[in-house]
Amino acid sequence: MTTVSPETILPLRRSVSILFSFVLLANVALAHKAKAVTGVTYDGRSLIINGRRELLFSGSIHYPRSTPETWPDILKKAKLGGLNVIQTYVFWNVHEPVRGQFNFEGRYDLVKFIKLIQKHGMYATLRIGPFIEAEWNHGGFPFWLREVPDIIFRTDNEPFKYHMQKFVEMIVQKMKDEKLFASQGGPIILSQIENEYNNVAATYKEGGVRYVQWAGNMALQTNTGVPWIMCKQKDAPGAVINACNGRNCGDTFTGPNHPTKPVLWTENWTAQYRVFGDPPSQRSAEDLAFSVARFFSKNGTLTNYYMYHGGTNFGRTGSSFVMTRYYDEAPLDEFGLQKEPKWGHLRDLHHALKLCRKGLLWGVYSSQQLGHGYEARLYEKPDKNVCVAFLSNHNAREDGTVNFRGVDYFLPRHSISILPDCKTVVFNTQRVNAQHNARTYHTAKETQKNNAWQMFQEHIPHFRRNSMTAQEPLELFNLTKDTTDYLWYSTSFNLEDDDLPMRHDIRPVLQVSNFGHMMHAFVNGKYIGTGHGNKIEKSFVFQKPMDLKAGTNHISLLGITVGLPDSGAYMEHRMAGVHTVAIQGLNTGTLDLSANGWGHRVGMVGEKFGIHNEAGSSHVQWSDAKSGTQVTWYKRYFDAPGGNDPVALDMSSMGKGLAWVNGECIGRYWVSYLSPLGKPSQSVYHVPRAFLKRKKNLLVIFEEHGGKPEDILIMTVKRDNICTFVSELHPAHSKSWEREDGKIKAVGEDVKAQANLKCPGKKVMNKIVFASFGNPMGICGNFTVGNCHSPQVKITAEKLCLGKRSCTLPVLPDAYGADVNCPGTLSTLAVQAKCSRRKRRL
């Protein structure tokens, strides 16, 4: 037996200690190295960002459709709504409006926007395109691109591919220079090349097949260190991921074109974009939540809401017939206000899905039928005690109960319940716990203060040989070159007395066939009418009676575009403007003026002088305004309404045209175009606070065919009417649960349904407008009591909520003295509260 002396043991212990420390430090270094992995990879399950799998909840927010001053607030609300990714297109035509001349300032500061996303702790998806559609003018292509010799857009065409590649590489390099790709420590985790090419691929045949392969490979060669995607592109080449766009990708998407690619949803439409002439359209929060839960239950790991905030098509940036307001039904409305319950219901959904993270990203998938229209989708990892279940009821009108693992679960119609532990329902897509709200408009006192208008009327041009002349009317796009919406066509012709109708009940009729989009007609300086097409059929035929005279007559036609096309094949060949012109009803028969010789004048005099801004307005003579005049400029000054609420103009008294505030164009208005419901598609127009000064703001309107500017209203916009509509059958709020040590646990003791109200900003509840427990009906702002109403509810709500920014109300009949045996009771609580700023003490 060998003995070891204490003197020998001590150095040995020291050596072991040193060795252990070395191993520990080595392990720490290796762990740190593992954490330091940067970049994005993927497999068939998910994206892997900086070495970590992620569930990704994304929203589209387009930097040019809002102002830099509002970006931080919009991004903050997006993150509070549970998003961890922001998606944006890159808008080629605003960045390179003139070939070789670039603009990345103000609303177009892409780098600033991406850095703000990173500052808010979120990732970014950059959809470079450069064809983007997006209901954006020319689909994002600059107009000069269509003037490149021999060019054909979006096919195997060398001129197009040259300019496309040059722009894509420029944007990529700009991002690399700022270290914005995830591989450099930045927020960009995905980039997109092209956009929904499958919609036009068949038109270009083999040229389209070659083009898609070229575009994908060109993108991959930029070496960004993050994946590239193509949406709606089943043959996305190589490592490019094909993704889904649509309303229900959980059912319509056939999946990636290779098992090593993850299931991504790049556009989940939160509503429907609208064009002038459209009636209102909506998509409910419940249906949207159902689609997302369905997608994640079928191996999806990234969904993107298109749009999360739509914003405004300022200036002339909207595509053909697209309204100035964009995706106002998104979770954040045009003004950046939270649209409830859509914003809150999706926030709660995101929290519920995050509780399912381990199962969704690592669990083994299975499904089982639970009856007609009922099913369970599972993700399990038994060795880690992980089990996630989605219980679905696909019946559109039938509520039901299913038995899952020995327990009965009630499933409302068209709903999915999420069980992060296969036991506890933390969210149901049809049961809305989030509060509701209603948007209201308030006329500001500044409307009538100094409501004095001046006008400058455009001269109606006559045909002159020294103008831009041609034998026939020329195509509009090629003359205006997207610098203006307007092109004048003029011609003159002579008539004898014998040419005119002899009978008093017969009048000559002007007939014009027009390729679109719109036209105002003037005969001998007198306005005779307007014609227009629509989003589906741009071309139209104009027919209006007119008065002619013996001698020389003048016809002046104002051709108008309402945005350039944004989609379809052969965009570079699209046409607009006057085609043929004839006069019917003359004694001598129809007079064809199509080849009579035509003069053309691009744009308005007021545009050329820039009279929409302070410096240019002095270049013309203004006079006191008169209502109802055509092709007329109007101006007035107004002070900005107090407070921080968004500002808007009610343009209901006007017809069609453009509006500017302090030289900034707030967009096209067209209130004279009524929807099938007999109302304008949009009558209220956003004026960002960033455009305003405190005093003496210059408002300039260009009105095309008559209106009453003195009746334009300056308004503030609020969502201060907040509501709750919750029943005893609702599950507890999803935030009542958290995952701890792999198990789902209640955050507090009470995990029953509750009603929560919270005022926006720093406002407090100053009035309970409505309160009922039992079977109330209606929507926020229009509730009515049922036959089981309890009068005690309002007293209780006032006690718990008045003077507070937020409050929680129980959803129990005992709390309100309600009759639980009342026939027809739904055990539902409905409360509407009014918010306002807390009054300062004197």
Image: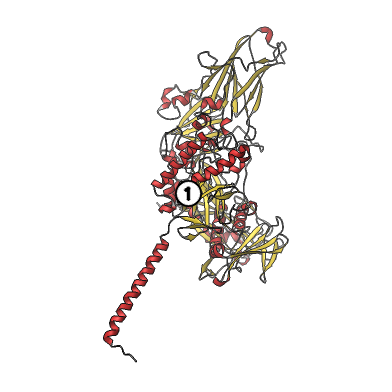
Which element type, helix, strand or loop, lies under badge 1? Answer: helix
Which residue is drawn at the image coordinates 60% and 32% (left, top)?
A: 672
Which residue is drawn at the image coordinates 30% and 84% (left, top)?
A: 9
Residue 262 can be seen, yes or no: yes
As rendered, which of 220 and 384 lies closer to the eye?
220
The furthest residue to the top: 497
Q: In this figure, what is the number of numbered marks?
A: 1
The furthest residue to the front: 1
As rendered, which of 294 and 162 lies closer to the eye?
162
Q: Position of residue 120 (x, y in %)?
A: 43, 53
| Residue 723 quadrant | bottom right
As rendered, which of 366 and 604 lies closer to the eye?
366
Colour scheme in use? secondary structure
| Amino acid type shown at disc 1 | Ile
Which residue is drawn at the image coordinates 55% and 29% (left, top)?
A: 708
The furthest residue to the left: 7
Is the residue 129 above or below the residue 618 in the image? below
Is the residue 464 above or below the residue 720 in the image? above
Q: Position of residue 491 (x, y in %)?
A: 58, 16
Residue 337 can be seen, yes or no: no
Which residue is drawn at the image coordinates 54% and 16% (left, top)?
A: 469
Residue that mark 1 sits on:
74
Q: Position of residue 163 (x, y in %)?
A: 48, 36
| Residue 291 quadrant | bottom right
Is the residue 50 above or below the residue 494 in the image? below
> Dot 1 surroundings within 10 Å: few (below 14), some, or many (20 or more)?
many
